Image (spheres, rainbow, N blue to C red):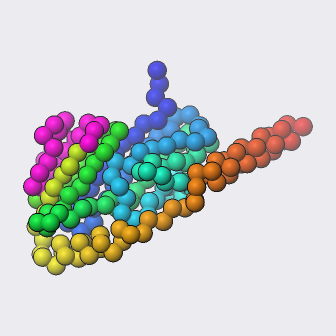
Amino acid sequence: MLDLLSIIVFIYLTGNNPSVTINATLYTPTLLMNITLPVQPLGPVTVINSTGQSIPYYISNNEVYLSMVNPGNITITYTPYINVLNNGTLQLRINTDYETQVYIASDVLPTAIPSNIQGFQETSNGIILTLAPGNYVINFITTGPTTTTETATQHITKTSTSQPIPYPSLSYIIVIIVVALALSILLIVRHRR
């Protein structure tokens, strides 16, 4: 059976700018689809299509809900929430339904990584871990100047309290999708007359 959706997940652990990128390809149109975020977002999430246009979405419990009336590609990007442990070590919790590539830059020193890694690749400026779907914890420290770590910690503390959600409830997005679908059908019927 042909998959209706193909998802590739990349998590980038760098000293100053960690990020998550999810590339999804939808092969058939769907009114409402959901994609599970592998890491809790720290702040805003960006969802764009292959032409760079923003796509409306709704987030609930690390699930992104959106409508794709045409087959195509979307990219979801955001900054992941990274926990700071009492000893100053940083911790990334991954809960993924998809195979995930974790890039760890050379300025990041892992102190604990999962034992069941599917793949490992060394690059010129870091490593790439391939993880199967599942739950993982990666503890790490940054090897840059102390001020870099403190700045990252302050950034996490300041912005973790706000996570804007584009729509107040799932009901609104469903109503918008149904109305858009009804208008599209009416336009098609009128055009054929």
> In the picture, which quadrant includes the C terminus?
top right
Magenta stretch containing residue 131, yes or no? yes
Q: Is residue 39 above or below residue 18?
A: above
Q: Which residues are the magenta region? A: 110-135
Q: Please indicate whether residue 123 sits to the left or right of residue 66 in the image.
A: left
- Residue 63 location in percent, x, y? 45, 48
Q: Is residue 74 above or below residue 118?
A: below
Q: Residue furthest right?
A: 193
Which residue is rendered at x = 77% and y = 40% of the image?
185
- Residue 19 location in percent, x, y? 31, 59
Magenta stretch containing residue 109, yes or no? no
Q: Is residue 100 above or below residue 142?
A: above
Q: Please indicate whether residue 117 sits to the left or right of residue 78 in the image.
A: left
Quadrant in the picture for residue 163:
bottom left
Which residue is rendered at x = 47% and y = 25% of the image?
2
Q: Is residue 158 above or below residue 95?
A: below
Which residue is rendered at x = 24% and y = 55% of the image?
92
